[in-house]
Image: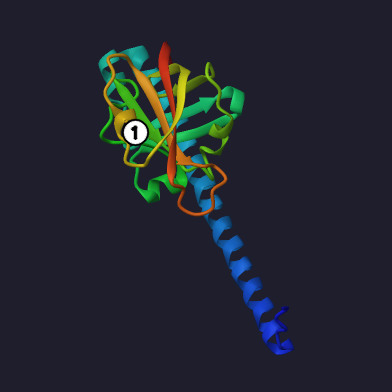
Amino acid sequence: MKIRWPPMRLQWLQWALFVIGAASLAWWGLVITEARLFQARQRAAFEGISRSVADADARDNQAASAVVAPGLIGELEIPRLKLSVVVVEGDDEDTLKVAVGHLPDTPLPWQAGNSALAGHRDTFFRALEGIRLGDEMRLATPQRELRYRVERTLVVEPDDLSVLEPSPEPRLTLITCFPFSYIGNAPHRFIVQARRIGTTSS
């Protein structure tokens, strides 16, 4: 049995859906714009800090180690996926809206152990849907570039913290929601784990 909407009610329904759709698009546009502006500012800051480190290193190694960027970790690249994103400290929602975040309870990437980075599946980490074993990842920091090789991918429950367990060797763990095409709060987490294979001084 077909529902026959009165013409006036149908017009109001169409108008309401149009307004909701337009508002959603406008909100999404603002989110994307904010993220792009943040990324551009952080990349400019990263380049400036890297030059300062290089200049300080040329004069004094101790001075070079003193050049820091509060909250700025570096820039993550996965060349095959054409993924390039700024990484900053923190895993709260405000941080993940504009960047990939380093989980504060894990070691920093240039330290020993298992360093974890989180990002949203519908923005910066969308490309992880196409990740493959053996893919190379690079994390450029002001002092050096860290290179990793993907060794494992898996899907876990949100409360499964085993992927954050310490490791004796330097590792990088990427975390995002799963499934990638899920609408709403995704029920699982997609994990990429990589082992460090090299370090290049800046």
Task: Determine whether 94 is above or below 72 in the image.
Answer: below
Work out which quarter of the rendered image holds the C terminus and state it. top left
* Total residue callouts: 1
74, 184: nearer the viewer: 184
Task: Determine whether 144 is above or below 86 in the image.
Answer: above
Q: Which residue is drawn at 39% across and 50% down?
A: 94
Q: Where is residue 59 in the image (x, y as percent from the top left)?
A: 33, 13
Q: Where is residue 146 in the image (x, y as percent from the top left)?
A: 42, 18
Q: In which quarter of the image is residue 4?
A: bottom right
10 Å crowding of disc 1: few (<14), some (14-19), many (20+) = some
Q: Quadrant of residue 147?
A: top left
Q: Which residue is drawn at 34% across and 29% down?
A: 163
Q: Residue at x 60, y 28 (%)?
A: 81
Looking at the image, residue 131 sits to the left or right of residue 3; the answer is left
Q: Residue at x 50, y 34 (%)?
A: 85
92, 73: nearer the viewer: 92
Could you tell me the amino acid type at mark 1? Answer: Ala
Secondary structure of residue under mark 1: loop
Q: In which quarter of the image is residue 19?
A: bottom right
Circle 1 is placed at which residue position? 69
